[in-house]
């Protein structure tokens, strides 16, 4: 095969891979086509990887094969061991690995580049790949640690934090600009000879520090938004690396990830009625010190699964609001069993899915799809919120912040202004929860103390299984 023919085949294959990426991303927009979208995107990536491996500049396949073997083993291991409740942490770590890969590739291309072939646009993208890639890596590690509980979830705040972070960013970019001005230059500073490689290593280190300092002032409740944003960063870093390597499919794939991550971040911010700036810089969830007014003593009435079944027997309409507690208890199958029995008996049963339910967008949808809950029963905030006032029973399973009435009126609450489900408008409210502990925002939930609320304490899976067994006996 001639070189010209090889290039034509590669370009056409990359074009096909890019089309498959776009097609797959479009299919991911609907639960009904999401599985196909994953498969289409995977085929596109396979084509891109195979064609890249046919590149004439590859010297040896030994390290590539070793990387494929090790990476495949680790991927299978993670898929088997990581629980669905830990998926946000894993997504965060994978974002970080993507950023690290982009930074390493950019750095390696710099090490093999000849000075006479270097251009200004090339060195600019090298610097940007390193900056964005390493910020993504360390920021993702911090976000994952906060979600996993290995790091303090509350914001870590100190004086002049925003100003010092901004200064660090400017210093990092300024040092990177030195490498842009002279990609292969040398400087004598204090008797030491510095090269552009040293400059890039300094940029590398400062970017790592920047990623940490950007994420630590953000509370654990906002980590899903941060992970979505860092996902976008990993795509931007990949696109920058595509310019470094002059690889069109990497540019397109990175741009798709970057753009979709930004849109997802905006969607999540809109769902909480907060700006991205508020999420990043407001320190929501910080511990407040000092004297506080005494809180009035509140009590709740404990109910049993028998009480739940008695009320369900007189209901005609039921709305189920699932949350992170459902995922922790792995109760989705028992919940679907209960809903199926109620539907068979003529009740109207639907699921209310909040955009930020769980620990990442789509978390609840995936859990319920795993239990074979029909897609048409899953309704969003705008589709179902007006129906709560005409509903006999709303069953809240592990959800908290998304049903907290304080979001409507309590201005000092971090939830204030966030669109919530009107669960308190239903005729009867059932809450299946382990305790009265507040949600991620740290705000006590007034719904638990509502006169219409039936609190069923305990593991959600165990409670639902008992409810199912009782319903079968009726």
Image: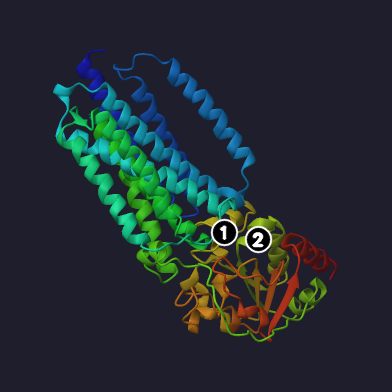
Q: Position of residue 188 (x, y in %)?
A: 20, 29
The local secondary structure at tag 1 comes to helix
Q: From this viewpoint, is residue 398 visible?
A: yes
Q: Identify the image quadrant of the N terminus.
A: top left
Say above or below: 244 vs 295: above
Checking the image for residue 326, the label placed there is: 2
Q: Position of residue 308 (x, y in %)?
A: 76, 75
Q: From this viewpoint, is residue 10 visible?
A: no
**Residue ranking furthest to the front:** 191
Say above or below: 343 vs 257: below
Checking the image for residue 364, the label placed there is: 1
Residue at x 76% of width, y 77% of height: 313
Q: Position of residue 454 (x, y in %)?
A: 72, 79
- Residue 267 sits in quarter: bottom left
Residue at x 44% of width, y 42% of height: 96
Foreground of the two, 341 or 462:
462
- Residue 457 sits in quarter: bottom right
Q: Is residue 462 left or right of residue 99?
A: right
Q: Residues within 10 Å of mark 2 (few under 14, many from 20)?
A: many
Residue at x 57% of width, y 28% of height: 73
CB under 8 Å between discs 1 and 2? yes
């Amino acid at each position: 095969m001639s070189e010209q023919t090889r290039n034509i085949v590669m370009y056409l294959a990359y074009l096909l891979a890019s089309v498959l990426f776009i097609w797959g991303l479009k299919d991911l927009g609907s639960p009904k086509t999401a599985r196909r979208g994953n498969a289409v995107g995977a085929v596109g990536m396979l084509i891109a990887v195979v064609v890249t491996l046919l590149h004439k500049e590859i010297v040896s396949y030994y390290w590539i094969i070793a990387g494929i073997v090790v990476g495949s083993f680790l991927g299978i291991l993670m898929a088997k061991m990581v629980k669905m409740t830990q998926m946000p942490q894993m997504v965060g770590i994978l974002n970080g690995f993507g950023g690290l890969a982009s930074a390493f590739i950019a750095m390696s291309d710099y090490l093999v580049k000849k000075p006479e072939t270097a251009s200004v646009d090339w060195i600019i993208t090298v610097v940007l790949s390193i900056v964005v890639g390493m910020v993504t890596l360390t920021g993702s590690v911090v976000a994952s640690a906060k979600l996993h509980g290995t790091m303090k979830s509350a914001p870590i705040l100190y004086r002049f934090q925003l100003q010092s972070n901004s200064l660090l960013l400017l210093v990092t970019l300024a040092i990177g600009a030195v490498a842009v001005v002279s990609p292969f230059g040398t400087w004598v500073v204090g008797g030491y000879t510095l090269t552009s490689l040293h400059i890039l290593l300094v940029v590398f280190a400062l970017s790592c520090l920047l990623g940490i300092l950007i994420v630590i002032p953000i509370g654990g409740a906002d980590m899903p938004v941060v992970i979505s944003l860092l996902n976008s960063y990993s795509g931007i870093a990949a696109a920058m690396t595509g310019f470094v390597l002059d690889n069109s499919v990497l540019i397109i794939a990175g741009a798709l990830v970057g753009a979709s991550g930004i849109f997802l971040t905006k969607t999540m911010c809109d769902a909480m009625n907060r700006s991205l700036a508020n999420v990043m810089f407001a320190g929501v969830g910080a511990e407040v010190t000092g004297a506080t007014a005494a809180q009035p003593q509140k009590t709740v009435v404990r109910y049993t699964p028998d009480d739940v079944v008695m009320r369900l027997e007189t209901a005609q309409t039921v709305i189920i609001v699932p949350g992170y507690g459902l995922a922790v208890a792995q109760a989705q199958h028992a919940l679907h069993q209960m809903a199926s029995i109620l539907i068979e008996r003529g009740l109207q049963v639907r699921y209310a899915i909040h955009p930020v339910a769980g620990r990442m967008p789509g978390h609840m949808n995936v859990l319920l799809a795993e239990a074979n809950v029909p897609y048409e029963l899953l309704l969003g905030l705008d589709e179902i919120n007006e129906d709560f006032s005409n509903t006999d029973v709303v069953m809240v399973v592990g959800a908290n912040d998304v049903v907290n009435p304080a979001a409507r009126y309590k201005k000092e609450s971090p939830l204030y202004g966030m669109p919530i489900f009107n669960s308190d408008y239903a005729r009867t409210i059932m809450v299946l929860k382990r305790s009265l502990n507040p949600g991620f925002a740290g705000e006590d939930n007034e719904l638990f103390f509502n006169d219409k609320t039936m609190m069923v304490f305990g593991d959600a899976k165990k409670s639902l299984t008992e409810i199912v067994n009782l319903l079968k006996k009726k």
